[in-house]
Amino acid sequence: MGISFNAASLLNGNGIDVNSVVEELQSASSGQLTLWQNQQSDLQTQASDLSSINSDLNNLATAVQALTDPTGSFSSVTATSSLPAVVTATANSSATAGNHTLVVSGLASSGTVYTDALASATTSILPSGAAGGEIQLQVGGSSGTTQTIQITAGSNDTLTTLAAYINKQSTANNWGVTATVLNDASGARLAITSNATGSIGALAITQNTTLDSTGTPTDLTFATPVGGTNASFTLDGIPYSSTSNTVSNAIQGVTLNLVSAYSGQVQVTVSPDTSQVTSAISSFVSAYNQLVQDMNNQFAYSSSTGSQGPLASDAGLRILQTSLMAAATYSNPSNSNGLVNLASLGINMNNDGTLSIDSQTLANELASNPSAVQDFFQNATTGFATNFNNDLTSLTNPTSGPLNIDLSQNQAEQADLSNQISDFQQQLAAQKQNLIQEFSAVNASLEEYPFLLQEVQAELGQSTSSTSSNTTPTSGTSTSGSSSSSSGS
């Protein structure tokens, strides 16, 4: 829109709005700036969508790599027990499939020594007049280590203080025992328990006397030690003894946890962990579907906007879509085990290009021939996951991958536009300053006009008055300026 001025308004001293005039003059140039800024916004949106889809692609690559890993889900095994209340089992990848028979005769136990009950846990355990005492505690059976427990009157001569003393010494000197005071209807007792199970945790009291020359015992009477025995069981008819109820050396790759003794047999079964394979396949399908759906959204026509997504015309996205479709429909008719494509496993392609899993079909194939399923995915030359992984390695290449190429070009275009916009904004800013100076000078003149006019009018009025006075005819003077003779000549 052009600029127009009201002449009457301009000459009345109001002047012009300099900033509005300058903005109007620059509005045409600003249109180019807006165009570039809109282009930059479009590029930013496309870059964001490309990055999101590229992230989907990398997630899919990770999921496919999991299906190619020979030490991954296909090598996982599981161990199950027919009686978890007697024994539980876990397996690692080194375990081999098989069935085992277990009979648990006894559990490994901690050794314990305890005293008869006393009336109070806070009265001295030393006979009257005794200054101290000594208890010898043997840890680890007859060939174990003997620890000396020194008792001092007034210091640690009650059950409470003695238990605290034993625990302190055990921690500091690695005795491997814990002392507690037990209270029940019969009174208070001192109990010392080994921190280890099995024969290495067997305890015994070898001495319990005061420190006087008579060898008088303390007021503590220890019962016969209990516990400190190894677990005993047979595995496939072979007898075993274990200091722990957690046994990891009886079946290769399997850890047994003995829970209870039982006279009957328990079956421990080691088999492929199909749940891990199912999970890996489900992760692959989920990652694939997310990528396909996000690409579909770019190509879908929106009735509300009357257009497709920002990347609908992106060549790299079309290349990716074609490559993924070819990889997902890969087929190997020569496969002798009958698993020629994903559909053979119950993984079917929907109309929109996504995949869905028939859980029952997949479970049946895994149960009937897990090695055939593994070969379908991981065969070095014909494996589905092997070939898909090769394709994805190319598609996700940081320099030659189609989406990475597009992102690189997008970033270069954004950089060029940013430079253009920055340069143009600097030009507009300089132009604006010049225009403001020019029109400010014009405005100053317009604002002075009424005052100048008044001065001119005032000057003109004064000149008119002066002229009338000087030209007033006088006797003997011609007002016309022509000469004439005086009377009487």
Image: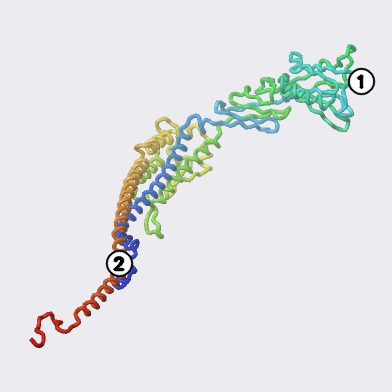
Q: Nearer the viewer, residue 22 or 132?
A: 22
Picture coordinates of residue 132, whole percent (x, y): 85, 18
Type of amino acid under label 2: Leu
Dot 2 corresponds to which residue? Answer: 446
Rendered image quadrant of residue 436: bottom left
Type of amino acid under label 1: Ser
| Residue beneath the point at 52% across and 33% down | 73
Q: Quadrant of the C terminus?
A: bottom left
Q: Is residue 14 visible?
A: yes
Picture coordinates of residue 136, whole percent (x, y): 80, 16
Viewer-side label of 1, 2: 2
Give me the disc on residue 424.
Answer: none
Position of 219 compared to 244: left or right?
right
Dot 1 corresponds to which residue? Answer: 128
Q: Quadrant of the N terminus?
A: bottom left
Q: Nearer the viewer, residue 478 or 458?
A: 478
| Residue beneath the point at 25% across and 78% down | 465
In the displayed structure, would residue 289 be above or below residue 228?
below
Helix, strand or loop for disc 2: helix
- In the current view of this chain or complex, which residue is farthest to the bottom? 488
Picture coordinates of residue 243, whole percent (x, y): 70, 21
Q: Earlier in the sequence, mark 1 or mark 2?
A: 1
Q: CA distance from mark 1 to mark 2?
A: 122 Å
Q: Nearer the viewer, residue 427 or 358?
A: 427
